[in-house]
Image (cartoon, rainbow, N blue to C red):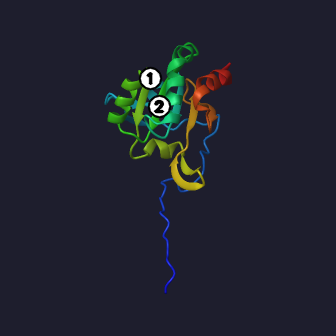
Amino acid sequence: MKPEIKLKKIIISPDKNNKMTTLTEGQKAPDFTAKDQNGNSVSLKDFRGKKVVLYFYPADDTPGCTAEACNLRDNFSDLKKAGFVVIGVSPDDKTSHKKFEEKYHLPFTLVEDPQKKIIDKYEVWGEKNMYGKKYMGLLRTTFLIDEKGVIMKVFKKPKTKIHSEEILKAVS
């Protein structure tokens, strides 16, 4: 009798280094252009002269991502007072983003990235571990970008329920 052979599912990542972002404070933020939840073209360079909270999250309408988005929503006026615009990026498409925006009344831009072009530029795709299972996915990360397009701060594992507070504390 031959022994049973079990094959493991392998997911190939576009991130050749398979690690968290190497982008650091003081570096120029990579520019991008993509569609938002309304189908409008959005480029990072459009926000020169403003500070940007660029947050990457795994998926619309999931518990952690919803907690993070709602925390940013609930503290949006404080973030605006501090001079920030907020842009969320995930692999979801604009239709999914529109439903997410409407369901939770999100007052900020959500950018689609199903081809992971922005995700690759910011190096936020890598190995994750959930309940002992390793897989590839988006690594929740936030970049604070100054008025000149330079990275001011990187949050590699933001706390979803208090992320706005983390941001405001970092810039105070």
Report crowding for label 1: few under 14, some 14 to 19, many 20 or more residues within 10 A (C-alpha): some
Above/below status of 121 relative to 162? below
Q: Is label 1 in a helix, a strand or a loop? A: loop
Q: Residue at x 49, y 87 (%)?
A: 1
Q: Position of residue 138 (x, y in %)?
A: 51, 45
Question: Mark 2 is on which residue type?
Answer: Gly
- Picture quadrant where residue 36 is located: top left
Q: Residue at x 53, y 42 (%)?
A: 122
Can residue 41 be seen by looking at this rendering?
no
Q: Is 162 positioned to the left or the right of 111 in the image?
A: right
Q: Position of residue 80 (x, y in %)?
A: 53, 15
Q: Is 102 positioned to the left or the right of 168 in the image?
A: left
Question: Mark 1 is on which residue type?
Answer: Phe
Q: Residue at x 47, y 63 (%)?
A: 9
* Residue nearest the observer in this picture, 154 or 1: 1
**Residue 108, numbered label:** 1
Can residue 57 be seen by looking at this rendering?
yes
Q: Which residue is mark 2?
A: 88
Q: Position of residue 100 (x, y in %)?
A: 39, 30
Above/below status of 113 relative to 2? above
Q: Residue at x 60, y 54 (%)?
A: 132
- Picture quadrant where residue 33 is located: top left
> Do the residues under discs 1 and 2 have CB atoms within 8 angstroms?
yes
Report crowding for label 2: few under 14, some 14 to 19, many 20 or more residues within 10 A (C-alpha): some
Q: Is label 2 in a helix, a strand or a loop? A: strand
In the image, farthest residue toward the bottom: 1
Going from N to C along the chain, the mark reached first, 1 or 2, is 2
Above/below status of 3 relative to 23? below
- Picture quadrant where residue 156 is located: top right
